[in-house]
Image (cartoon, rainbow, N blue to C red):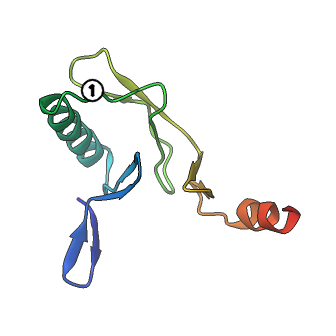
Amino acid sequence: MGLEIQDTTIYSMLFADDQLLIAHDYEDLEYITRKLIEEYELRGLKLNVNKTKYMAIGDTLRDLQLEDGKRIISHVNEYNCLGVRMTKDENHEPEINDRINR
């Protein structure tokens, strides 16, 4: 679970009101998302599933359905994070073309 960089593992990256979770597989993503929602609820916060999406690099996965069966997080093939377009196949051409056109 997480992204290992030297002797540190990164599970989450935060910027303002955005949070990016990092997981190796669907089961890890399911677990870390469930734990995050539990922590949010302890502090009186709520995850907006309408704005929340997930993307898996290289794989096509199903939507993420959490244990309660009510919350479903949609899987996307392309995602814009902090102004950078990322694609599941790690194709950087669309982002490069966008920047050239701007």
Residue at the spot x=60%, y=55% of the render?
87
Query: Could you tell whether 91 is left or right of 31 in the image?
Result: right
Q: Within the image, what quadrant is residue 35 found in?
A: top left
Q: Residue furthest bottom?
A: 6
Question: Is the C terminus in the top left, top right, bottom left or bottom right quadrant?
Answer: bottom right
Q: Residue furthest right?
A: 101
Q: Position of residue 32 (x, y in %)?
A: 22, 45
Question: Is the N terminus in the top left, top right, bottom left or bottom right quadrant?
Answer: bottom left
Residue at the spot x=55%, y=56% of the render?
82
Residue at the spot x=71%, y=62% of the render?
95
Q: Residues within 10 Å of mark 1 (few under 14, many from 20)?
A: some
Identify whether 58 is placed above or below 27: below
Query: Could you tell whether 8 is left or right of 17 in the image?
Result: left
Q: Position of residue 91 (x, y in %)?
A: 66, 63
Q: Nearer the viewer, residue 19 or 72?
A: 19
Identity, as a three-letter code, of the amino acid under mark 1: Leu
Residue at the spot x=79%, y=60% of the render?
98
Element at label 1: loop
What residue did someone put label 1 on? 66
Q: Position of residue 7 (x, y in %)?
A: 19, 82
Identify whether 51 is placed above or below 95: above
Query: Could you tell whether 69 is left or right of 95 in the image?
Result: left
Tell me how many marks there are: 1
Q: Nearer the viewer, residue 60 or 52?
A: 52
